[in-house]
Amino acid sequence: MTGRFTYTRRRLGKAALAGAALVGAPLPLRHAAAQAPGNLKVALLLPTSGLQAQIGQACRRGADVANEVFADMKLPVKLDIVNYDTETKPDVARTQAEKAIDAGAHMLVGAFDSGQTIAIAQVAEQRGIPLVVNIAAAPQITEQGYKFVVRNFPTAPMLITGALALHKEIFKVSGKTPKTAVLMSVNDTFGTAMVNGIKALFPKLEMPYEIVDTITYDPAAKDLSVEIGKAKATKAEMLMPVCRLNDAKLLIQEMVKQRWEPMAVMNPGAPGLYEQDFLKTMGKYSDFLISNVPWLDPKSAMTQALEKRHLAKFPNDQLDLNGGFTFEAMLVAAQAWLTAKSTKADALMEALRKTKIDQHVMIGGAIQFDAKGQNVNIKAAAVENLKRKPTVVMPLDAAAAPLVFPMPGWNDKRRT
Amino acid sequence: MTADFFLSLAQAIAKGLLTGMVYGLMALGLSVVFGVMRIVNFAHGEMMVVGMYLAWMGFEYLQVSPMLSLPLIAILFFAAGYALQRGLISPFINRPEHQQFLLLLAIAILLVNACLAIAGPDLRGVQMEAQFESYELGPLVLDAVRLHAALTAIAIAGLLWLFFTRTRTGKSIRAAADNHTGALVVGLDVRRLYAFTFGVGAACVGAAGALMITIIPVSPFLAVEYTLLAFVIVIVGGLGSMTGALAGGLLIGVSEAVAGLLLQPSLKSMFSFGLLILVLLLRPQGLFGKAGS
């Protein structure tokens, strides 16, 4: 059967219109399609088992709600987040980073702990894949000239400077100043960086108290009775712990048992004292301990959106700086992708260097990275545990409750 | 030297003695097994960790205090130890030492991995009100859970002493340990006595585990530390000597506490190993061991 096909002006017009529709229709969707789920694969490397498991899981919760918060904030982006467990071990962190890159990750995020982060940074640098550090304070992470690493967390000297400035402010407001302090620290990468930083910065900052002893211990310590006994023997008026979660619990438990009641337990910028598991386990003994750390800005619209989503998804879990900084790491990754419009490492890295995020969740200025890849705009707050809740008490303009200082005794009636 | 220093020193010694009693109970199991069977239990730390996990599970899932679950754990460990000796270890009694070592190492690896598979790698601890309590004894402050654990360890060691000196089975075990051939000649069932001994050793370590969980949290990776610690204690005290195990435990407990006070707390383990080297150099049989044992 044969048919004769003739071109008419009308038929040609229809064909042209159909062709144009076919080619042109997806144009408005093209940008969105390029950023559909699965396009930017982010490997989130955290210690979700082992010694730092609880903190790693708290970090992860911040990432788990990231896409929902982006949607609430009308950010046209959705990340494909793949979780990897570092088991609180640097060697596993390295292996997992390699595995993530082999599986096609375009960007790495992690890893809460300095030692593990350094291991991941080396892999990121070797393989040319960008790493956004969520939490890790060891200065060397951004001091080694890495080209593929940015950090949205203060370095140890930044943490210390901010924390010690808050110490002075607390003494000024309360009218009480301890004359002596004892510094207790884990002897891992983070702890060592903090102790060295404190020793270097202390004379310059003209602090009103003297550090009479520095006691270091293994991060995997199961018993700190000897350490606390030694600290108590110094008769120091303040304990400055550079701790993690499990050792923070051991420290306070031993202090209660050994009936050591200094004027304050106030960290110089470290985790442990504000963690949900710490508050739950220590109960009334967790109150009135002070952490001087970067904290969530309650006035930010994005923080409010994050808190809402976090509460809805994890009603039994507290949102703290771990979740806040991990969420921000996802925000940095998402923003870089929006800017780069590509999943290529060089384009993403170029976009990361140009990052400027004014609206975010942690207290401080815009998220921006200097030439070394460090965000220098993060500010610290004094967070005191009050009625089992970490509460901002300093600086005064951000305070959510009045400061209680000196710390009431372990059996004081104010602890209920 | 000030009064404060001596008070701190006394405090450290008291704490070391209390912890040392639990160490001693743990090492007692190792020493009893070696003293009678001449087998070194390389799975000792792993058994201790299993004891800690059982006590933790009792507390976590059944709300039973480790002190209350201790007798049940000790009985379970006795039965498991008895069965293990009869089923697996007994055929290895007369084999070369390296074969015994490999067998017990395999058991150790199995136990650690079972703990990992069941409870995961995270630290598991019990949280009791007593863990925040202490007693005042003059100027000294004594940790409540350590004191309870130490008193229980003393009671168990006392029972063990009564068992070995007052019961027929205990005396038979000592006879078999002193003279294996003689024991066979007089008609003692040495195989059963060996199994019984291993059961008693296992019960000691299980009980020590139940006590230790009240002091520190457990993870499967603790096992190697405890095996090493038990070895240091029994070598310092004298392999095969019950008194030596208890004295070694006290000595290591006190030396760790005092070293932590006088030097750096992170150097306390180094001090124990220094003590071990000294004993090996000056008195290789250990403080209470017989020469040539």
Image (cartoon, coloured by chain):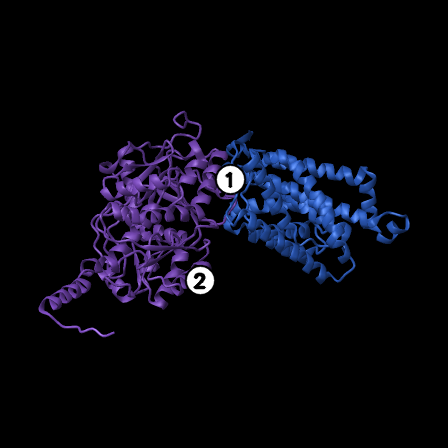
Chain colours: A purple, B blue
Of all residues shown, which one is farthest toward the right? B186
Q: Residue A95 carries which label?
A: 2
Q: Please tell me in which quadrant of the rendered image residue B130 appears.
A: top right
Residue at image position (49%, 44%) is: A227
Instruction: Name the image quarter holding residue A301.
Output: top left
Q: Which of A261 and B185 is in front in this view?
A: B185
Relative placement, left or right, of B47 versus A355 is right
Tag of residue A196: none
Q: What residue type is labelled 1?
A: Phe
| Chain letter behind tag 2 | A
Quarter of the image where the C terminus of chain B is located: bottom right
Mark-to-mark CA distance, 2 and 1: 49 Å
SS for tag 2? helix
Q: Describe residue A368's horizontal placement relative to residue B152 as left or right.
A: left
Viewer-nearest residue: A362 or A399: A362
Image location of residue B234, percent across then percent down: 68, 50
Q: Quadrant of residue A30?
A: bottom left
Q: What residue type is labelled 2?
A: Thr
Secondary element at tag 1: helix
Most distant residue in the top direction:
A413
| Residue carrying label 1 | B5
Q: Whole-percent x and y of residue A249?
A: 46, 40
Residue pictured at 63% horizontal, 54% vertical: B108
Circles 2 and 1: CB atoms closer than 8 Å: no
Q: Nearer the viewer, residue B45 or B138?
A: B45
**Residue B86 appears in the picture as rendered:** yes
Give percent across and percent down for residue B54: 60, 42
**Any part of residue B244 in sight:** no
Residue A175 placement, left or right of B96: left
